[in-house]
Image (cartoon, coloured by chain):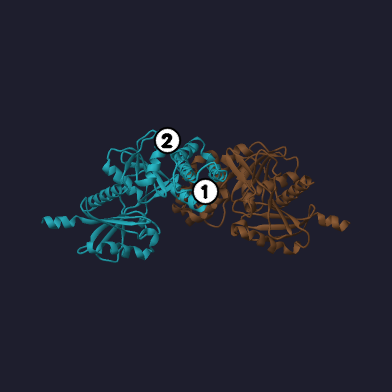
Chain colours: A brown, B cyan
């Protein structure tokens, strides 16, 4: 009997974003094995999702239909099947979970819905699972959760409820300006902490100056006033600083947790420190998995 | 004698920008004939400038070396020959004009230097000629001159002197966001004046909101709150509005002249009107030619 109980608790957790697909073979709350591929939503047509998933997990799907619970852009309009949004204020994770009709009989796929906000208009998809995971790992947390990425999200959380959130294009803006604009001619690959801080603080003092500060980077270079490495750091400081100026009401005077690792999360932590905020950090993958596990538990509670 | 005097006064005016080359066969202050090509600075290597010019004007160069006076990016570091900058405050046009060593003996080429400002760092190349032309056509003008373009310039002019200027990347930012960012999925080709005005005024009220307003365009579309045409107009309003918020100290409470024609200059005029400013407009080509004629006169005064 022990064996069949364990099998009944087998499922597959899936984090399916724009640029990658990550899967975990789960037994209850324990991850037995993890795999990943580059078959992100952005690379797939609608008919490509099921084959891409099966390619990664075929040997995990052997008997009765196995539950698959997925989060992320897989549930977008351009994804496998649209999962809709739940309107804030609400718990980050909850019904209705979206059921996908898979062709392969061994799969019972559900997708976690995103969150929406009507005024000001905003949406998220995938981050709700990380926020839910953060709260599962740190149940008493109330405050602000920042999720650095191409589209940075700031979510306000109180007593387990997401009360509001806001998205900025900061990561995308930096990529466009550093790779596609006239500024690219003057940017090095190195770094300069002082120029980064200067950019952040300039936007704190006068955010409207963003429009003129951008060409200022080019002009400083042409006039020999700043190195290419400092120019790159200044541009990063300006875009992150503008974002912090826009979102200060969200994160000021309360606990801030950044979900993310690596360079970008470090830069946000540095920029927040310049504003006097010491942010905690949580791991990207750990919060995603914790959120999927929490959502799986909610689903099981709902079943008769 | 009349004929030889006239010939002594023959010269060629050249406006050589990043994306186009325009030439005028001049007799004194009178344009006898105009031609243009797409051989802009951006399409040419250093050895390509002289052939590109000769291709357009070979039949105008027949006897003794003919003076050629050029303005624009032809004098940039990546241009035919670097023409340097004159530091403001200064008259928009003045010595030292830069002499280019052409291979063809029939050409005596000079390039008008750009203007630079050390703090805040800024540069212009080509616009100084239009500003000089504006002052030649309207000698009593003191106030602010705006030059809409990929890199918008705002110049402060007092008693014939450029006292300061500032450049914004607004045009380039709009192009990058509308063509390269996630927003491109939700932008129509039409227009909506109310959404444009809303974008301009939102930035007047709270310029830091730029960082969050951008993704708001995407979210409004996903939630069905705004049409794709209105989304395009709102994006335009946001980038122009952010620029106006950044540069208000330059153009508020004084006469404003916009040099430029077409859609972009109209949008700036509309946005300024929302701020209570009625801008005058001057023609792009007319001011450029007037500036070249004025610079030519200065050169002749300098010669023994």
- The mark lying in front, picked from 2 and 1, is 1
- Parent chain of label 1: B
> Is label 2 in a helix, a strand or a loop?
helix
Neighbor class of circle 1 (other Cα within 10 Å; few <14, some 14-19, many 20+) is: many
- On what subunit does the disc labeled 2 rest? B
Q: Which residue matches tag 2?
A: B274
Closer to the camera in the image, B123 or A165:
A165
| Image quadrant where residue A88 sits | top right
- Horizontal side, residue B265 vs residue B294: left or right: right
Within 10 Å of disc 2 (Cα), the crowding (few <14, some 14-19, many 20+) is: some
Nearer-N-terminus badge (2/1): 1
Q: Which residue is mark 1?
A: B186
Tell me residue A236's x, y (percent).
Answer: 55, 49
Question: Where A83 sits versus B44, above or below?
Answer: above
Same chain under badges 2 and 1? The reply is: yes
> Relative to B223, is A232 above or below?
below
Image quadrant where one finds the N terminus of chain A: bottom right
- Image height check: is B106 above or below A128? below
Which residue is more in the foreground, A60 or B58? A60
Left or right: B225 in relation to B21: right
The reply to whether residue B147 is visible in this rendering is no
Q: Residue at x 69, y 62 (%)?
A: A54
* Label 2 – label 1 distance at C-alpha: 26 Å
């Amino acid at each position: 009997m022990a064996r069949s109980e364990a099998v009944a608790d087998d499922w597959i957790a899936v984090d399916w974003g724009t640029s990658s697909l990550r899967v975990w073979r789960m037994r209850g709350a324990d991850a037995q094995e993890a795999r990943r591929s580059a078959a992100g939503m952005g690379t797939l047509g609608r008919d490509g999702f099921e084959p891409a998933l099966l390619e990664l997990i075929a040997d995990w799907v052997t008997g009765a239909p196995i539950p698959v619970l997925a989060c992320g852009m897989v549930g977008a309009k351009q994804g496998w099947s649209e999962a809709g949004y739940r309107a804030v204020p609400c718990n980050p994770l909850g019904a209705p979970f979206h059921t996908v009709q898979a062709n392969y009989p061994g799969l019972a796929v559900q997708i976690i819905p995103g969150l929406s906000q009507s005024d000001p208009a905003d949406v998220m998809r995938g981050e709700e699972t990380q926020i839910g995971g953060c709260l599962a790992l740190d149940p008493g947390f109330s405050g602000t959760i920042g999720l650095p990425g191409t589209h940075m999200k700031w979510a306000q959380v109180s007593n387990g409820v997401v009360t509001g959130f806001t998205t900025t294009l900061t990561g995308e803006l930096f990529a466009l300006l550093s790779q596609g604009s006239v500024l690219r001619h003057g940017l090095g690959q190195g770094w300069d902490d002082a120029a980064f801080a200067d950019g952040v603080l300039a936007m704190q003092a006068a955010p409207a100056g963003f429009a003129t500060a951008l060409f200022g980077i080019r002009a400083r270079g042409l006039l020999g006033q700043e190195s290419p490495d400092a120019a790159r750091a200044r541009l990063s400081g300006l875009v992150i600083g503008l974002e912090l100026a826009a979102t200060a009401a969200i994160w000021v005077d309360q606990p801030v947790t950044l979900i993310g690792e690596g360079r970008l999360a470090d830069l946000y932590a540095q920029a927040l420190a310049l504003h006097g905020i010491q942010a905690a950090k949580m791991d990207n993958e750990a919060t995603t998995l914790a959120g999927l596990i929490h959502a799986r538990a909610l689903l099981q509670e709902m079943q008769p």
